[in-house]
Image: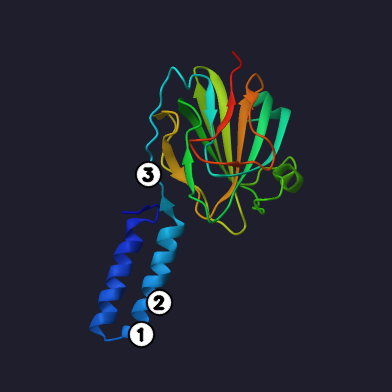
Amino acid sequence: MIKSYLPSKYNTWAIIILIFLVMTKNYKLIIPVLLVHSFFYLILRKNPNRFRDDHTTTKGVIFAPCNGKIVSIEKGISQVAYGDNLAEIQIAIPWWSEMGIFMPLSAEIRNIIVHKGRSFFRFQKASEVVGTSIGKGLSILLDNRGESVGMTLYKCRLGLWPDILVMPGDRGGRRVNIGYFPFGGTLILYLPEKYEILIKENELINAGESIIAMLPE
């Protein structure tokens, strides 16, 4: 059975509406209601998480935290929340892909910051749109044994706010699902510059499967 990020209350309301339509004999509306509910259920589908982390073979590896397309890769970036000399990787999450957000590595959630800036379209480069200001979304600061790795999720004008299921102080294993981004947006991954980047601009990546970077041997 297909699982979905669609909140259970919407499934409950769909059932109540269908029962009401049957009781009132409004049979013509049953199919449209089923189609609308099925559409959102499938768009917000949740892929089964069958990842099994082998700490020996995945040590020092950064996996893709989401599905999407690499918009840009820059090095030598300074970011207030995450530090200096960082590699910045911008990923556009399309509205039709599976929208889960996954841990790129095993780490502790040090902080989550909500931003109230303006939203922008996902396939635009973030720095060209928001400049030095912060876009609308949130930042997640990961602590990997004293080393910072950051993820910033910017809301698209055609999307919704990211729904994150973790809190500061929580620990998560590599490739564990920690939330989802309804109808997609932009995710920016900030890594210490010592990591070797293994992906290229315009490359398509799969959450929890594609290797973004790794520590040189």
**Distance in Å between CA atoms under marks 2 and 1:** 8 Å
Q: How is the image coloured?
A: rainbow
Number of numbered discs visible in the structure rendering: 3
Choose top left, top right, bottom left or bottom right for residue 187: top right
* Residue furthest out toward the left: 23
**Distance in Å between CA atoms under marks 3 and 1:** 35 Å
Residue receiving disc 2: 32
Q: Which mark is residue 28?
A: 1
- Residue nearest the observer in this picture, 209 or 184: 209
Q: Position of residue 12 (x, y in %)?
A: 29, 64
The crowd level at tag 1 (other Cα within 10 Å; few <14, some 14-19, many 20+) is few
Q: Are marks 2 and 1 in contact (CB under 8 Å)?
A: yes
Residue receiving disc 3: 48
| In-image side of 16 versus 6 (left or right) | left
The three-letter amino acid code for the residue at tag 3 is Pro
Q: Position of residue 53 (x, y in %)?
A: 40, 26
The three-letter amino acid code for the residue at tag 1 is Lys
| In-image side of 70 versus 110 (left or right) | right
